[in-house]
Image (cartoon, grey):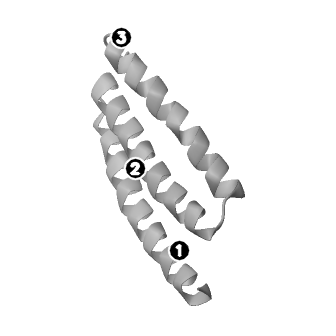
């Protein structure tokens, strides 16, 4: 389990930060969607890293690193397609 009030508060705040990112990805313009994609990837990586530290499971840290790499690749692909339309 997550030890301490600060760890639980950090997890709640990080998960709460994913909500506006998802709304911006669904309703925003192309640039807002790109910014939301970057922000959601970073926030998701931090959530998984916090869970890895809290539960002591290295598999969650592997998932966090994989999410960081895939988020970077997705951002670059989206930016390339966005560059064609502007």
Q: Which residue shows up at 48% across the image and 68% down it?
A: 74
Q: Quadrant of residue 55?
A: top left
**Outermost residue, top direction?**
4
Indicate left or right for 40 with 33 as reference. left
Which disc number belongs to residue 78? Answer: 1
Tell me which label, 1 or 2, sits earlier in the chain. 2
Q: Which mark is residue 5?
A: 3
Q: Residue at x 42, y 62 (%)?
A: 70
Residue 77, position in %: x, y? Answer: 49, 77
Q: Residue at x 53, y 74 (%)?
A: 78
- Residue 30: image x %, image y %? 62, 69
- Label 1 – label 2 distance at C-alpha: 16 Å
Q: Do tag 2 and tag 3 residues touch (Cβ < 8 Å)?
A: no
Question: Which corner quadrant of the image does residue 52 belong to?
Answer: top left
Instruction: For marks 3 and 1, give the CA distance.
Output: 38 Å
Instruction: Identify whether 77 is placed above or below 21.
Output: below
- Would you call the spot at circle 1 few (<14 residues within 10 Å), some (14-19), or many (20 or more)? some
Name the secondary structure under disc 3.
helix
Instruction: Label 2: state its secondary structure.
Output: helix
């Amino acid at each position: 389990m997550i030890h301490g009030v600060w760890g639980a508060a950090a997890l709640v705040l990080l998960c709460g930060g994913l909500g506006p990112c998802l709304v911006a990805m669904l309703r925003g313009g192309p640039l807002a969607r790109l910014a939301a994609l970057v922000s959601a990837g970073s926030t998701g990586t931090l959530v998984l890293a916090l869970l890895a530290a809290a539960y002591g499971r290295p598999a969650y840290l592997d998932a966090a690193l994989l999410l960081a790499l895939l988020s970077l690749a997705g951002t670059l692909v989206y930016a390339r397609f966005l560059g064609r339309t502007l």
